[in-house]
Image (tube, rainbow, N blue to C red):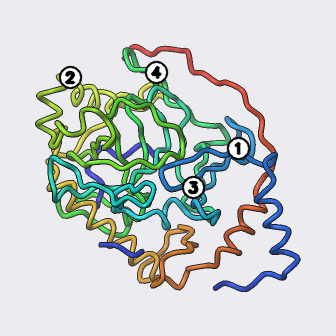
Amino acid sequence: MRPPPLRPPLGCLLTGFGSLSASRNKLVAQAAAAPHLCYLRKNMHYQTEHRGRPHSPDFRIYFKTSQGKYVSPFHDIPLVAEPEQGNDVPAKKPKNDENEVLFNMVVEVPRWSNAKMEIATKEPLNPIKQDVKKGKLRYVANIFPHKGYIWNYGALPQTWEDPNHTDAETKCCGDNDPIDVCDIGTQVCFPGQVIQVKVLGILVIAINVKDPDAKNLNSIEDVRNSRPGHLEATVDWFRKYKVPDGKPVNQFGFNGRFKDKDFAVDIIKSTHEHWRALLQKQTNSEGIECKNISCCESPLKCSADEASVIWFNAHTFILFFSWTVDKWHFV
C-alpha cells in the first residue's frame, strides 16, 4: 500500500504449478500446525500469520482461509463481500438498502498508527509488509493535530490501478497498486483484518458495515452533514503528510472535491476489469506477482500445496515490542 496519489484511483468478479512429494507435503503440514512458528489472528473468514519481527524489513503478514489454505489478499479475497453467515443461518441483507453492494477491505494500517504497511504486490502470495525506502522503514509523521493515519487505511482486493491506463477524468495513470480505501468507522482495526465496507465516495471513503453509524451514512453528503470537519481533515492530511520529509504540499484532482458513491463504484468496477486482465496475462504485469489459488480463469493459478510451500519458506521467527512515533510536526 502506498498513500494514494492525490487524485481519484483509476478504478465484475473472477472468483497447477508442479507438484510436491509426499514427504514435502507432510513437512509443510507439520510446519503449518506448529503453534510456535507464527502468531495467528482470526478475521471474518480469514486468519493472519505474522512471520519475522515487527518493525523490521523481514516482517510479513500472511493470509489463510478458515480451511487452512494460504491465499493472496490481493487476488484470492473477493472484491464484492458475501453477507456474513453464522451457524448455518442465512445472512440478512442490510436493512437500509436491499441493493447495497458491500466490498471487502483489507486493512493495512490501523487508525492512529504510523508504520506504512502495504500489500507486497511483487512478492508471492502478496503478504502485508512495512514499506522501505532507501533502506529505511517508512513511518508517516504526526501532522498536528493528527496522530498517524486518521482512519483505518487499506486496499480493495481484486482491483488494480493499471499504470498503462490513462484515466479519462484525471488524465493520470494508475499507480500499479490495488485501490486505496479509508474506513471512517469508529473501530480501530488491526493490520490484515478483512472488513466489509459501504463505499461512500472518492477519494475512496468507506465505512465498516458493523459500525453503529453505518446505517446512517450512505453518501459523501451524509458524512459532511453528520461529521463536520471529517472530510476537510482528510484533505488536510493528504495535502501535508509528506511535508515533514521535505516534500511540497500535495495537490488534489477535482480541486480537492470529493466525488459521489456512483462515481466511486464506477472506478472500482473499472479497476476490477484491469485486475482481471492482469491475472489472465492480457496486459503487462509491471512486476506484479499474480500467484493465486482461486481464480479459475487465470493461467497463474497455483495449487494450495504450492502456496503452503511459499509460506513455509518465509521467515519463521517472531519477537514482539512496541514502537511509537512521538514527534509532532506543525505544518
- Residue 239's place in the image compared with 69, above or below, is above
Going by the numbered disc 1, the residue's amino acid type is Tyr
Residue sitting at 26 percent across and 51 percent down?
8
Badge 3 is on which residue? 120
Q: Could you tell me which quadrant the C terminus lies in?
A: top left
Give the CA distance from mark 2 to mark 3: 33 Å
Q: Residue at x 37, y 66 (%)?
A: 162
Q: Closest to the observer: 88 or 121?
A: 88
Task: Identify residue for label 1.
Answer: 39
Q: Quarter of the image holding residue 269?
A: bottom left
Q: Which of marks 4 and 2 is nearer the N terminus?
A: 4
Residue 117 position within the rendered picture, expressed as x and y whole percent measured from the top left: 54, 42
Query: Which numbered circle lies on residue 229?
Result: 2
- Badge 2 element: loop
Q: Residue furthest right?
A: 23
- Marks 4/3 in contact by CB < 8 Å: the verdict is no
Which amino acid is tagged 3? Ala
How far, Cα to Cα, is label 4 from label 2? 18 Å
